[in-house]
Image (tube, grey):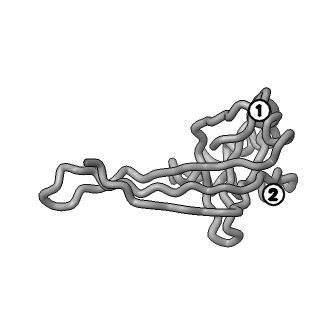
């Protein structure tokens, strides 16, 4: 994700995401304080880029990579129930251990800030290495 940081320098960071098909938003979570949060509160526009592992066609050495970039604005989620639900959905990308997920939300949920990137523009492409 990239935001406008201190002194208007671009600030990019790797961050895990969850795409919610119901509302079309990308969700992220993290601590309630820090440089990233300060930057998003100062200027709510952001971009996010993601790409897949790629694939090779039979008989080709070149890797084909699909990527998507989203331009949009940040919304902070205030509702605790939504924060817990989306945090659990994001966690399921990495584990199916429901007991672990529940325990982590109990331990860290009150310290978690959930925010969404609401898309204004989305573009994607497939690039072939050559």
Residue at left 39%, top 59%?
126
Q: Residue 110 vs residue 105: left or right?
A: right
Q: Residues within 10 Å of mark 1 (few under 14, many from 20)?
A: few
Q: Position of residue 106 (x, y in %)?
A: 74, 43
Q: Could you tell me which quadrant the N terminus lies in?
A: top right
Q: Position of residue 27 (x, y in %)?
A: 68, 54
Q: Position of residue 15 (x, y in %)?
A: 60, 41
Q: Residues within 10 Å of mark 2 (few under 14, many from 20)?
A: few
Q: Please name the residue that numbered disc 1 is placed on.
A: 8
Q: Quadrant of residue 31?
A: top right
Q: Of residues 115 and 71, which is closer to you in this image?
A: 71
Q: Residue 118 vs residue 17: left or right?
A: right
Q: Residue 94 vs residue 79: left or right?
A: left
Q: Of residues 73 and 103, which is closer to you in this image?
A: 73
Q: CA distance from mark 2 to mark 1?
A: 34 Å
Residue at left 60%, top 62%?
122
Q: Please name the residue that numbered disc 2 is placed on.
A: 81
Q: Quadrant of residue 24?
A: bottom right
In this rendering, is residue 22 above or below 82? Answer: below
Residue at left 71%, top 40%?
3
Q: Of residues 42 and 53, which is closer to you in this image?
A: 42
């Amino acid at each position: 994700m990239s935001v406008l940081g201190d002194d208007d320098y671009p600030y990019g960071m790797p961050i895990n995401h969850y795409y919610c098909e119901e509302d079309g938003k990308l969700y992220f979570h993290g601590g309630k304080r820090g440089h990233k949060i300060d930057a998003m509160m100062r200027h709510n526009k952001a971009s996010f880029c993601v790409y897949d592992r790629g694939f090779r066609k039979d008989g080709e050495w070149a890797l084909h990579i699909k990527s998507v970039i989203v331009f949009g604005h940040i919304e902070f989620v205030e509702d605790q129930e939504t924060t817990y639900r989306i945090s659990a959905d994001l966690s399921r990308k990495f584990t199916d251990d429901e007991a672990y997920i529940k325990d982590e939300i109990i331990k860290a949920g009150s310290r978690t800030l959930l925010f969404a990137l609401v898309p204004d523009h989305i573009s994607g492409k497939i690039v072939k290495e050559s």
